[in-house]
Image (spheres, helix red, strand yellow):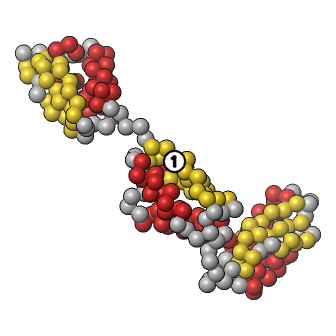
Amino acid sequence: MKTDSQLQKDVFDELSWAPDIEHGHIGVTARDGVITLSGHAPNYAMKLAAERAARRVHGVKAVAQEIEVRFASDPKTSDDEIAQRIVHMFAWNVSIPHDKIQVKVEKGYVTLTGEAEWNYQKLAAWRAASQINGVLGVMSNITVRQRPTAHDVREKIIAALKRSAEVDATAIEVRVDGSTVRLGGSVHGWNERRVAEQAAWAAPGVLSVEDNIVLA
């Protein structure tokens, strides 16, 4: 006797095998030999085809038919359709980091998770999801990445210099202006200067380093 999980898999495989069934929007559950088909189909014929496919599987005792017929002209308001439309809209919106945001839709309610570099990106994702037909509400759990302050960057660079046995940290000046680090002071050799540059480049948020260190 097949287990529910095996029976569920066999029915799903049969739906996938049938050439006249678009199985991507059909869900299958099994319990004590009873198969429940859910989701939606583009026409009544496909709904019946899905039921026939399920009944062909050995071990199926009964089929509960809950597939909804959705014509192409009908509003796309099922959870999977809403999710697909949101993902598609995100991909076309340059203000949204679509590859870093996950979308979940449950009974018309959308939950957004992931990470954004800026708060305007988080707001853009919320607005885009809210505009989709069929959405009943949007919960945004997107986190905005904490950007380091100039003081934090400077302190991290100085700490890295102090940890290094190859450089005298007290002889090097560090200034941070936005994403630019400016190094000053003096060192005794080119290797010390290289170590100082590497420490500056390793700090988070640094896009450029101006090395004004001189050789003593």
- Residue type at mark 1: give it: Ile
Position of residue 79 in the picture relative to residue 95 (left or right): right
Across and down, in percent, residue 71 comes to: 66, 83
Image coordinates of residue 194 in percent, x first then y, are 19, 26
**Quarter containing the N terminus:** bottom right
Can residue 188 be seen by looking at this rendering?
yes
Q: In the drawing, does residue 99 fall left or right of residue 106?
A: left
For the point 17% across and 19% down, which residue is it? Answer: 172
Tell me the quarter of the picture where residue 47 sits.
Answer: bottom right
Q: Quadrant of the C terminus?
A: top left
Query: Which of the 4 image quadrants contains residue 102?
Result: bottom right
Q: Residue at x 66, y 69 (%)?
A: 78
The vertical placement of 65 against 185, above or below, is below
The answer to whether any part of residue 19 appears in the image is no
Most foreground residue, 12 or 138: 138
Write down the quadrant of residue 70 in the picture.
bottom right
Per the image, the residue denoted by label 1 is 142
Tell me which residue sits at (20%, 24%) in the image.
Answer: 174
